Image (tube, rainbow, N blue to C red):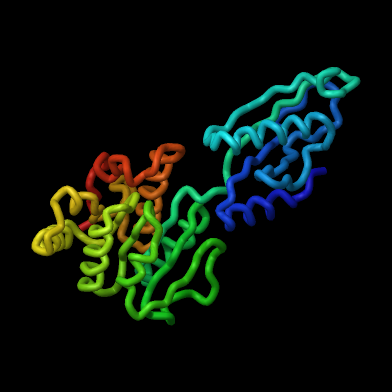
Amino acid sequence: MNSTVWIEALASLQQQDEACVLVTVIEELGSTPRNAGAKIVVSAARSHDTIGGGHLEYKALQIAREMLADASQQPRLERFALGASLGQCCGGATVLLFEPMGRAQARIAVFGAGHVGRALVPLLASLPCKVRWIDSREAEFPESLPRGVERIVSDEPVDEVANQPAGTYFIVMTHNHQLDLELTAAILARNDFTWFGLIGSKSKRARFEHRLRDRGLASDVVQRMRCPMGLAEVKGKLPMEIAVSIAGEVIATYNANFGTQAAQDKQPLARLLPSSRRA
């Protein structure tokens, strides 16, 4: 029976932002000793757990590492007829599923540890994301953080904008409108992000657009800001409802960009999405 070593390995590799392939025995045809559902995690350097060893596992490792070398992002199914070619004396076949995973699809900076932030961050942490959670108020953070979340307590949150890598997803939802404005100006001035969402209403967006243009930011850059942010189809005013809406837009964005060239060089998905209805 397959162990749970693969689960811990997968979580560890994702935490380290290291690409891997999860290989699963999907189907057994004929008389073979392998168990459907057995899994092995394959990284460039190592493999974790087993699907039963032998030449079939050797071939699975070979295919998985070819996928890693090619930076393949698409899952694939492979059917192996058991016989002389795989060193088997019996007939039958095994179907294997190869799933690329383990590498974070999004690096997210969340500014604000209020009610919506506390609902949103655990959702983001359950996705293939690495999250930096930033606030000046240490007491607002929960005592324990989900795996993959880094807490940053800073008296100058705006300074943290410059510390994020290019292609970051920025989410601004602080307790202070002026701080929101300063963060927004710093993020838009960089203009190398994948996605930027600001919590607020349409009237807040209008006020911010006016002030940002007064600061010399170009209209096309300001238009990259998602405010209100989140998917309009996910309605509700509760913190968790808003968090689900925001997380849904993040998922839509990284799936749209997954496997493509650097996201910041492409048209932002925000331009393709309808404006949120939250006022």
Residue 90 visible in this rendered orientation of the protein: yes
Horizontal side of residue 134 vs 44, given as left or right: left
**202 with respect to 198 (left or right):** left
Identify the residue at horizontal 55%, vertical 53% (top origin).
17
Look at the image and tell me whether residue 203 can be seen: no
Place residue 217 in its image quadrant. Answer: bottom left
Q: Report whether 116 appears left or right of 84.
A: left
Give the number of marks.
0
Quadrant position of the N terminus in the picture: top right
Considering every residue shown, the one lying at the far right of the view is 89
Q: Residue at point 52% right, 77% down?
A: 143
Question: Which part of the image, by quadrant, shows the C terminus?
Answer: bottom left
The foreground one among 153 and 165 is 165
Kindly identify the residue that appears in the image at 58 percent across and 39 percent down.
100
Q: Position of residue 134 (x, y in %)?
A: 39, 70
Residue 113 or residue 104, whichever sits in front: 104
Position of residue 19 relative to residue 37, above or below, is below
Expressed as whole percent of the image width and height from the top left, the position of residue 266 reads: 31, 40
| Horizontal and vertical percent position of residue 263 | 36, 44
Task: Residue 187: give x, y in percent of width and height.
Answer: 28, 61
Name which residue lies at 43% across and 67% down: 133
| Left or right side of 66 for 201 | left
